[in-house]
Image: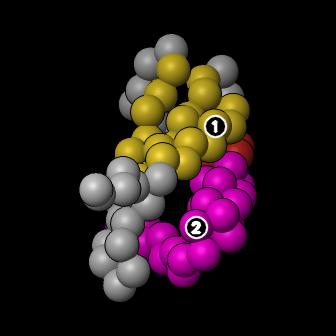
Amino acid sequence: MRAEPQLVVRSWPVGGRTCTLTVRGAKPCTAMQATAEWSPDAPTGFTPAEWTEYRAGRHRAFAEIAAELGVTVAVVEV
């Protein structure tokens, strides 16, 4: 019997929206995929304050997820 990957979800406010990050736990030494969803709609751009809010929430969410799953996380912005 195969175990399903663990699903981890974190949400945080960004301006008048909510960003929800979903990560499926992966097997050791494999890449994981994170999906960000926005409510009520996806932003078309951020103010400098919203960028700060988004990044702080994202970093907090990934730190919690890394600790929960026992993995190392790298975030690359391009």
Residue 64 included in the magenta stretch of the image: yes
Q: Tag 2: residue type?
A: Leu
Picture residue at 36% right of the left edge, 51% below the top: 4
Marked residue nearer the N-terminal end (1 or 2): 1
Residue range corresponding to the magenta coloring: 55-78
Where is residue 40 shown, x and y percent of the image?
A: 51, 15
Question: In this figure, which residue is indicated by the disc labeled 2?
Answer: 69
Which of the two residues, 27 or 15, is positioned nearer the viewer here?
27
Q: Is residue 44 in sight in this rendering?
A: yes
Q: Tag 1: residue type?
A: Ser
Answer with left or right where residue 22 lies relative to residue 68.
left
Say if 77 sits above or below 1 in the image.
below
Q: Secondary structure at mark 2?
A: helix
Picture residue at 62% right of the left edge, 43% below the top: 10
Where is residue 31 shown, x and y percent of the image?
A: 32, 73
Question: In this figure, which residue is indicated by the disc labeled 1?
Answer: 11
Q: Is residue 59 in sight in this rendering?
A: no
Where is residue 26 shown, x and y percent of the image?
A: 38, 66
Q: Secondary structure at mark 1?
A: strand
Mark 2, Cα crowd under 10 Å, few <14 / some 14-19 / many 20+, is some
Mark 1, Cα crowd under 10 Å, few <14 / some 14-19 / many 20+, is some
Where is residue 32 shown, x and y percent of the image?
A: 36, 65
Answer with left or right where residue 27 lies relative to residue 70.
left
Can you tell which of label 1 and label 2 is closer to the viewer? 2
Answer with left or right where residue 44 lies relative to residue 49.
left
Asked whether disc 1 touches disc 2, contact meaning CB atoms under 8 Å apart, the reply is no
Answer with left or right where residue 32 lies relative to residue 10.
left
